Structure formats: structure tokens, C-alpha cells
Image (tube, rainbow, N blue to C red):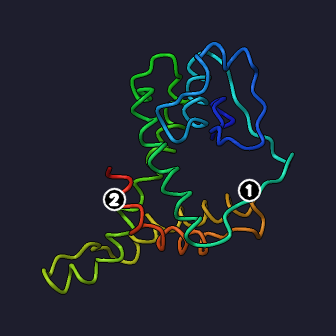
Amino acid sequence: MNNSSGSAVYTGSNTLILRKAIDEVGGFPTDTVTEDFELGVLINSHGYESMSTLEPMASGLTPTDFRSILNQRTRWARGVVRSFYNVHILTNKNLTLPQRLTFLNSYLYWWSFLRRLLYIFAPVIFVLSGIKVVDANFWLLMFLWAPAYFLLHHSLSVASGNIRTERWGEIQETVLAPYLFIPVLL
């Protein structure tokens, strides 16, 4: 999606950027903790395209413990949400519709904790109030859930091989969801 819109999300590490593009947008943004993401949006809004390669071109380090992962995710969540408003992604006339959708997808990702918290608390909500969070028969569930599940499974297997699976991704995101609630709202 990102490459097809010419707006691969810039996430800082292992990136080449034209100096001219950085200068044209006024340098690195300083009013966000995700200056990389915001710089990428600004560069795209000035007519430049950004692309990701299919093969790894460099390696880097990732957090190795829960506290470090949580700190990183909190920083990313707060930064992307702030940058979304800083550069007016939805109303920025210099971005194409596909580019806006790409960046909107990045923004909405950080709000996914809401559905995960609803999932976690659905049994409690039902027991206390009798409200069914999901009321669907088998065929409706298969119609809505199965295509999304198999598309995600296929996408992850193409993109990451055996490194990350949809099951592991869901577990990881669900564990992090309660911790992201306050930072994203703030």
C-alpha cells in the first residue's frame, strides 16, 4: 500500500533522503517525538515520493525487554497521533488521496487498542449489563472474519516469512493495548 502511493512511511532508521527534500520542508520537525514520520509526510506533501525495498538493505537493533518495547511503542503512538494533526493529513491538499489513506492507516493503527480493550472487557460487560458486544451467527462471522484473517495471514507470510505470525501479532498488540490507552488519549 505504501509503495503504491509513493509514500512509504519513514520510520527513521536505515533511510536515504535527498538533502534538497529535507531543506525544502524546513528541516527535521522539532515539535513531535516522531520527527521521522512527520518529515516523511512533509516530504511527500512537497511532491517527493518515498519507497521501501523488498529486500533488507541494512540491519538494526530492536528493544529486547518489555519495558523498552512499551517505551518505544508509547513514543511512537504519541508522536504519530501528534504529527497527524501537525501536518493536517486529512485536509492537506498537497497529498494525494492514496497518500492520505496511507498516513491515515498509520494514525488509526494507534487507536486499535480501543477494540482490543473492548474485546478484553466484553465478557465483563455482558455479565454486568447483559449487553452483547458481538451478536452474529456462524455465517455472518465467516463472511466478515475469514477474509480478513486469511488476507492478514497471507500478507504476513509474504512480508515476514516465519518471523511474525498473525497469532503472535495479536497477542503482542493485546498485551500492549492497556498500556497505550492513556498515552494515546493524551
Q: Secondary structure at mark 2?
A: helix
The x, y position of residue 171, in whole percent, is 53, 75
Local crowd size for mark 1, using a 10 Å CA cut-off: few (<14), some (14–19), many (≥20):
few
Q: In terms of sequence position, does the residue under pointer 2 or pointer 1 come before the other?
A: 1
- Looking at the image, residue 79 sits to the left or right of residue 182; the answer is right
Q: Nearer the viewer, mark 2 or mark 1?
A: 2
Identify the amino acid type marked 2.
Ile
The x, y position of residue 174, in whole percent, is 47, 71
Q: Nearer the viewer, residue 150 or 182?
A: 182
**How far apart are the alpha carbons under marks 2 and 1?**
31 Å
Task: Please tell me in which quadrant of the rendered image residue 127 appears.
Answer: bottom left
Local crowd size for mark 2, using a 10 Å CA cut-off: few (<14), some (14–19), many (≥20):
few
The x, y position of residue 3, in whole percent, is 69, 36
Q: Going 52% across and 30% down the picture, which residue do you hit? A: 30
Identify the amino acid type marked 1.
Ala
Q: Quadrant of the N terminus?
A: top right
Q: Going 76% across and 21% down the picture, which residue do you hit? A: 18
Count of numbered circles in the view: 2
Q: Secondary structure at mark 1?
A: helix
Write down the residue under mark 1. Answer: 159
Write down the residue under mark 2. Answer: 182
